[in-house]
């Protein structure tokens, strides 16, 4: 069943970070007037807001971005319970126990991804399979190539509260990506949700 246009606009802005009404109408196959109407309603609901962006000569263009309320439409997974459990492990068993928990999760995650990547041969094949696997887990992942570099992009973090409470989760994910992509490449995180970014971005270069 096709999602309502308003929901698809929110999803599109989550993935793209910003977009004009014309681009939204084109990508969602709706009329320009229809797109403007939905954008107006979403803005009145406090889910999106317009921002002006200069693009060379001529009048600035109006882009739309998600507000904090709009971003909250893509919630963390069991955030409160997860944070409470992590705090209990830390308080009752100590930091070492928390490190062991993260290491065990890192290992099991790596083994799961390594299995689905076993038949890939090129970097692009690995990225395609990896983004599909991550998207199924709620990370809204995609990849792109710019010049000689590749970028693995995660537009949402379903474990954001846990990662904020304990950044060992983020270190473990970066370590996993480096191992899965291969030592012939360098993987570095260049944008980070819990550091104030709108998404997590990993740059992959040789």
Image: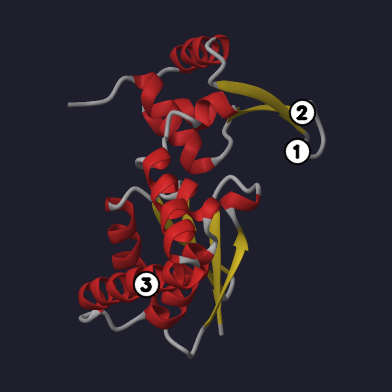
Placement of 58 over or under 89, stated as above or below? above
x, y percent for residue 112:
24, 71
Q: Residues within 10 Å of mark 3 (few under 14, many from 20)?
A: many
Q: Which residue is mark 2?
A: 60
- State left or right for residue 55 relative to residue 134: right
Of marks 3 and 1, the one in the foreground: 3
Distance in Å between CA atoms under marks 3 and 1: 43 Å
Instruction: Determine whether the residue tagged by mark 2 lies in a helix, strand or loop.
Output: loop
Q: Which residue is mark 1?
A: 55
Instruction: Determine whether the residue tagged by mark 3 lies in a helix, strand or loop.
Output: helix
Q: Residue furthest bottom?
A: 184
Q: Nearer the viewer, residue 59 or 153?
A: 153
Of labels 1 and 2, earlier in sequence is: 1
The number of discs equals 3
Q: Which residue is mark 3?
A: 106
Q: Residue sitting at 58 percent across and 45 percent down?
A: 198
x, y percent for residue 18:
58, 36
Placement of 47 over or under 88, stated as above or below? above
Task: Assign the N terminus to one quadrant of the image.
Answer: top left
Name the image quarter holding residue 29.
Answer: top left
- State left or right for residue 6 relative to residue 53: left
Are the residues tagged 1 and 2 within 8 Å (C-beta)?
yes
Colour setup of the view: secondary structure
Of labels 3 and 1, earlier in sequence is: 1
Of marks 3 and 2, the one in the foreground: 3
Placement of 116 over or under 59, stated as above or below? below
Residue 138 circle label: none
Placement of 137 over or under 30, stated as above or below? below
Q: Residue sitting at 37 percent across and 28 percent down?
A: 8
Q: Is residue 4 visible?
A: yes
Q: Residues within 10 Å of mark 2 (few under 14, many from 20)?
A: few
């Amino acid at each position: 069943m096709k999602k309502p246009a308003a929901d698809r606009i929110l999803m599109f802005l989550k993935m793209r970070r910003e977009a004009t009404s014309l681009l939204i109408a084109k990508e969602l196959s709706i009329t320009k007037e229809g797109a403007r109407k939905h954008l107006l309603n979403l803005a009145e609901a406090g889910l999106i807001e317009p921002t002006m962006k200069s693009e060379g000569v001529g009048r600035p263009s109006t882009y739309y971005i998600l507000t904090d309320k709009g971003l909250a439409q893509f919630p963390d997974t069991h955030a409160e319970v997860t944070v409470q459990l992590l705090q209990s492990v830390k308080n009752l068993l100590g930091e070492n126990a928390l490190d062991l928990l993260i290491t065990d999760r890192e290992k099991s995650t790596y083994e799961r991804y390594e299995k689905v990547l076993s038949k890939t041969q090129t970097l692009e094949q690995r990225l395609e399979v990896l983004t599909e696997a991550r998207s199924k887990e709620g990370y809204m992942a995609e990849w792109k190539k710019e010049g000689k570099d590749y970028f693995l992009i995660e537009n949402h973090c379903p474990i954001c509260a846990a990662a904020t409470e304990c950044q060992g989760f983020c270190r473990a994910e970066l370590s996993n990506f480096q191992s899965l992509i291969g030592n012939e490449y360098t993987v570095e995180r260049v944008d980070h949700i819990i550091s104030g970014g709108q998404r997590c971005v990993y740059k992959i270069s040789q």
